[in-house]
Image: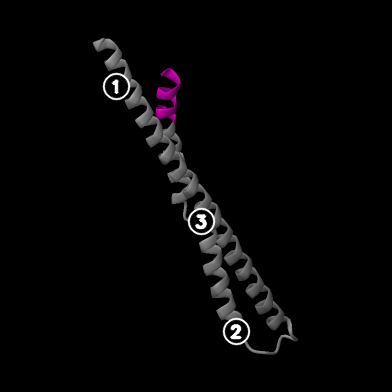
Amino acid sequence: MIKSRTVLVLIPVCLLAVRAVRAEEHPDMQAAQQALESARQHLQAAGHEYGGHRAKAVERVNQALEQIRLGLASAGGTEKRVERREQGLQRREQRLEKRIEGMKQGEQRMDQR
């Protein structure tokens, strides 16, 4: 009985930690993405007299933006895995609560005899 109570105490704590991880919005990556988009616009607006270096810079900025997109997608996959774990913990908590309730009812029946 003590183990199940300990688990019931630990599960909500784990759920809070999981929610905190999921709530993170990646502000640094989003800021970098905005800065690169702005840089790309400035580079594209610049003249063509830079011996191909402007075009190469635009290409590299596009590559950096793609890496940010992939990184954010990867983080999104992590958040989905965390959400699935959270759901599993909630189901486990419900099963434990039912089990504890059944044990309490069994104790009450034994006390009545």
The answer to whether residue 68 is above or below residue 91 is below
Magenta extent: 1-10
The N terminus sits in image quarter: top left
Residue type marked 1: Gln
Q: Which residue position holds label 3?
A: 26
Residue type marked 2: Gln
Residue count near mark 1 (Cα–Cα under 10 Å), binned few <14, some 14–19, many ≥20:
few
Q: Which residue position holds label 1?
A: 105
Q: Which residue position holds label 2?
A: 44
Residue shown at the point (73%, 81%) measured from the top left: 53
| Residues at marks 3 and 2 touching, judged by CB atoms closer than 8 Å | no
Residue type marked 3: His
Disc number placed over residue 91 in the picture, else none: none
Q: Examine the image and state in which quarter residue 3 appears.
A: top left
Q: What percent of the width, then of the height, locates residue 32? A: 56, 64
The colour scheme is one colour
Residue lying at the far left of the rendered structure: 112
Between label 3 and label 2, give the one nearer the viewer.
3
Q: What percent of the width, then of the height, locates residue 17? A: 46, 39
Q: What percent of the width, then of the height, locates residue 84? A: 48, 48
**Viewer-side residue, 49 vs 88:** 88
The answer to whether residue 99 is above or below residue 32 is above
SS category of the residue bearing label 1: helix
Q: What percent of the width, then of the height, locates residue 110? A: 30, 13
Is 59 positioned to the left or the right of 41 in the image?
Answer: right
Q: Is residue 111 magenta?
A: no
